Structure formats: C-alpha cells, structure tokens
C-alpha cells in the first residue's frame, strides 16, 4: 500500500506545480497586455494612417513629421489658398521661392535689410538640409518660413496621397530643423502651384496655410530686369502677393529688379507685410 500512495502523492504534486506555472504565466500575460493598452497606440486600426479621421483626411492628431517627435502639433488653419495680405491697407507681400541658394539668398537678404522690407521664404526641404546656415540667416532676420516640398516636384499632384503627405511633412521637418529651435513654418506652397485638396488639407491640419500668389514675375526664366520690374508694377492691381526666386539658377536679374522695386514700393506708399494665415 505504501508504494501506490507515494505515486499518487507525486502525481498530485506535479499537477499542482503545473497549475501554478499556468496561473503565473496567465497573470504575466495579462499585465503585459494591460501595459501595452495603456500606451499611446500607433493609429486608428484599419486606416493605415495614424490620426486619420476616417474620411481619408489627416486629422489634428496626425503624427509629427520626422524630427519633431513629441512636439505639440500647431493649430489647424484654413485649407483655402491664401492670396491676401494679413494687414489692412496698401501692402505688398514679397515671397521668395526655391532657395536657399549660396550667394543669391544672402544678396536678397541684404537688400531686404537695406530697405527694411519683410518677406516670406518658400524653402525646398532638401535645400534646407544642404544649407542650414542660410535657413538660419532667413529666420534670424525675422522673415517667415514657407514649406515648398522636399524635392520641388511640379507633378506631385499626380502622385499618390502618401507621396504628397511625405513631401509636405518631411519638408516642414527639414526646414524647422535647419532654422533652429522655436522656428515655425507657417505656409505651404506647392511647387509650380501643384496643389491638390489632399495636400492642402495635410498642410492646413499641421498649421500651414496653403499659399498662392497674385503677381508672377517669371523671374526664374531670366526674362530681363526690365520685364521683371514691369510685371510687378503692372500686376499689383491683381493682389499683394508677389512671386520672386532666390534659387533654381542664376538670380542676378531678380536681385537687380529688387534693387529697383523695393524703393519703388515705398515711394508708392506700400508697406511690406505677410500673406494671410
């Protein structure tokens, strides 16, 4: 009788031990699941896009662009393309595109300082990465920053929404990183005006007003200093937002035209302002 009793005791002990192991494993799994559920999460299930509002549009909770993790997203602004000045009265809004560019950006900055003029610089993200010191000079001079996409692809309106989103948000991160702590990008201008409803909504939901223009000088074509000057003087009746370039090639004609136009604006009673956000 002693041997069967001992065998049964060992069986009971083994069963009790296995039950205890299963119990503690279950408890550990529950704790792990609870810890994971208490985290921030990675996005709305099934949408493939964190912060998506369920209608294919990025919401205010969309993730920060690369390099801005943990930062509080700026307040949403209007997704309508801005062609107006934020200041009342007779104003001109100078916008400078496609930089920064060594040599030309500094020359433009020097002219703006000489005539106490302000401008909005629409910066290409990859150029900001290449020349961060120039972006810092723009920001330090008190001018406003505008996102002009990562690569200046004028056909980006034909590309998938995921591509458009990366072009807008990655460029913003590149520009803000180059400009330094506290810098904010307040506008988004699509390269070549290649806006889509989606890219405008991406920009607006991240605090960047889509930015158009009223007067196109076509200075990037180097049409001649006189042509650029005349385009501005005759075009100001169309609105206050004037398009110039400090990048994309030799901008000697642009600099020469600005040397004439900046004092002309003052003589005509214009004040220098910024586009409406």
Image (spheres, rainbow, N blue to C red):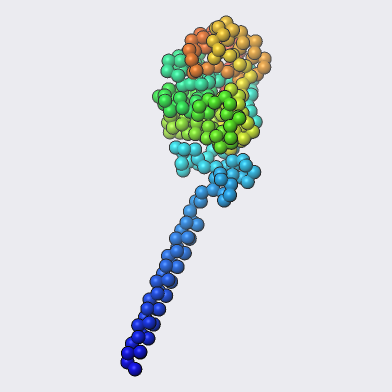
The answer to whether residue 259 is visible is no
Task: Give me the residue at 58% from left, 20% from top.
Answer: 93
Residue nearest the observer in this picture, 197 or 144: 197
Q: Is residue 155 above or below residue 33?
A: above
Residue 261 x %, y % = 56, 10
On the image, which quarter does residue 270 sit in?
A: top right
Determine the residue positioned at 61% across, 30% down.
Answer: 158
Q: Residue at x 62, y 16 (%)?
A: 215
In this rendering, the count of numbered labels is 0
Q: Is residue 57 visible?
A: yes
Which residue is most to the right? 237
In the rendering, at what x and y percent does residue 268 appear? Answer: 61, 10
In the picture, measured across the screen, residue 124 lies left or right of residue 193, that is left
Residue drawn at x 43%, y 22% is 134
Q: Which residue is at the front of the view, 188 or 265?
A: 188
Judging depth in this view, the residue of 192 and 256 nearest the camera is 192
Which residue is nearer to you in this view: 81 or 167? 167
Q: Quadrant where the N terminus lies?
A: bottom left
Dividing the picture into quarters, in which one does residue 229 lie? top right
The image quadrant that residue 204 belongs to is top right
The residue most toward the bottom is 1
Q: Position of residue 247 (x, y in %)?
A: 49, 18
Where, quadrant-wise, is the C terminus in this rendering? Answer: top right
Image position of 244 with respect to 53: above or below:
above
Query: Is 13 left or right of 37, judged from the image as shown?
Result: left
| Residue 16 x/y as whole percent | 40, 78
């Amino acid at each position: 009788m002693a041997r069967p009793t001992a065998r049964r005791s060992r069986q009971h002990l083994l069963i009790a031990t296995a039950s205890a192991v299963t119990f503690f494993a279950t408890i550990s799994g529950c704790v792990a699941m609870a810890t994971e559920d208490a985290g921030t999460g990675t996005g709305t299930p099934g949408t493939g896009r964190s912060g998506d509002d369920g209608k294919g549009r990025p919401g205010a909770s969309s993730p920060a662009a690369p390099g801005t993790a943990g930062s509080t997203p700026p307040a949403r602004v209007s997704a309508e393309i801005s062609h107006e000045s934020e200041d009342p009265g007779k104003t001109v809004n100078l916008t400078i595109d496609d930089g920064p560019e060594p040599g030309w950006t500094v020359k433009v900055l020097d002219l703006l300082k000489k005539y106490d003029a302000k401008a909005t610089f629409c910066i290409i993200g990859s150029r900001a990465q290449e020349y961060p010191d120039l972006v810092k000079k723009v920001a330090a001079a008190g001018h406003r920053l505008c996102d002009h996409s990562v690569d200046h692809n004028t056909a980006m309106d034909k590309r998938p929404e995921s591509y458009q989103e990366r072009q807008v948000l990655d460029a913003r991160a590149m520009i803000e990183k180059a400009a330094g702590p506290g810098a904010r990008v307040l506008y988004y201008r699509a390269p070549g005006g290649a806006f889509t409803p989606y890219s405008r909504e991406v920009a607006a939901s991240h605090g960047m007003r889509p930015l158009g223009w009223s007067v196109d000088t076509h200075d990037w074509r180097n049409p001649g200093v006189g042509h650029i000057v005349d385009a501005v003087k005759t075009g100001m009746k169309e609105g206050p937002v004037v398009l110039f370039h400090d990048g994309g090639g030799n901008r000697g004609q642009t600099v020469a035209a600005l040397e004439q136009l900046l004092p002309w604006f003052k003589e005509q009673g214009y004040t220098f302002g910024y586009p409406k956000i």
